[in-house]
Image (spheres, rainbow, N blue to C red):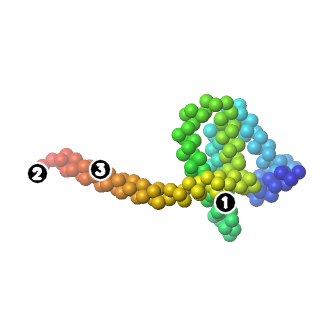
């Protein structure tokens, strides 16, 4: 099967999955499909949906990013860096909208499928979202974003300096006079 072979190519590189597949007498792609199926079933049944979406959306990409950093191939570096740019924006939007959207039927399973689409190297999901939506938006608004980040950084430094001065003044007022 084409999909099992593609999964196997990917998961053959992960020693623990390779060992498990050898012990089970099957391809790593079958192990991956079983794990994805069980994960989806758990999320569908509302058994640990946040854990499983974090596992798929953060832990797995985090490990694959580690592998990419350690490899000499720059293509996988770009793929995972693109993923993190997309997932940062996805997480921001999800945090804002989740209090309303989580009431929708199949919200968590849909979110899991979106994360799978974004994270899976074969779909190029993160790259597609980045090229089609994020890059044009960020490029159009880059100057304004940079200005606002600069202003926010300046305000944070001012607030930090003011807080430090107040803390020192308060501490000096607390000291007993000689």
Residue 56, above or below 84: above
| Distance in Å between CA atoms under marks 2 and 1 | 65 Å
Q: Position of residue 166 (x, y in %)?
A: 25, 49
| 3 vs 2, front mark | 3
Which residue is under mark 1?
A: 79
Residue 158, disc: none
Q: Earlier in the sequence, mark 3 or mark 1?
A: 1
Q: Earlier in the sequence, mark 2 or mark 1?
A: 1
Q: Position of residue 107 (x, y in %)?
A: 65, 35
Which residue is under mark 2?
A: 178
Residues packed near mark 3 inside 10 Å, few (<14), some (14 to 19) or many (20 plus): few
Which residue is under mark 3?
A: 163
Image-quadrant location for residue 55: top right
Q: Position of residue 7 (x, y in %)?
A: 80, 53
Residues packed near mark 2 inside 10 Å, few (<14), some (14 to 19) or many (20 plus): few
Q: Are marks 3 and 2 in contact (CB under 8 Å)?
A: no
Describe residue 99's horizontal placement relative to residue 35 as left or right: left
């Amino acid at each position: 099967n084409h999909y099992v072979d593609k999964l196997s190519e990917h998961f053959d590189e992960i020693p623990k999955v390779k060992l498990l597949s050898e012990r089970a007498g099957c391809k790593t792609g079958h192990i991956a499909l079983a794990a994805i199926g069980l994960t989806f079933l758990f999320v569908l049944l509302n058994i640990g949906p946040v854990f499983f979406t974090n596992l798929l959306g953060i832990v797995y990409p985090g490990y694959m990013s580690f592998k990419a950093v350690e490899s000499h191939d720059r293509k996988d570096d770009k793929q995972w860096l693109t993923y993190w740019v997309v997932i940062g924006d996805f997480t921001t939007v999800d945090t804002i909208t989740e209090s309303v959207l989580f009431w929708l039927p199949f919200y968590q399973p849909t979110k899991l499928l979106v994360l799978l689409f974004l994270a899976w190297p074969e779909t190029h999901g993160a790259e597609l979202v980045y090229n089609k939506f994020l890059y044009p938006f960020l490029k159009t608004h880059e100057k304004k974003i940079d200005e606002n980040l600069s202003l926010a950084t300046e305000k944070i430094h001012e607030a930090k300096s003011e807080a430090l001065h107040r803390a020192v003044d308060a501490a000096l007022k607390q000291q007993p006079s000689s």
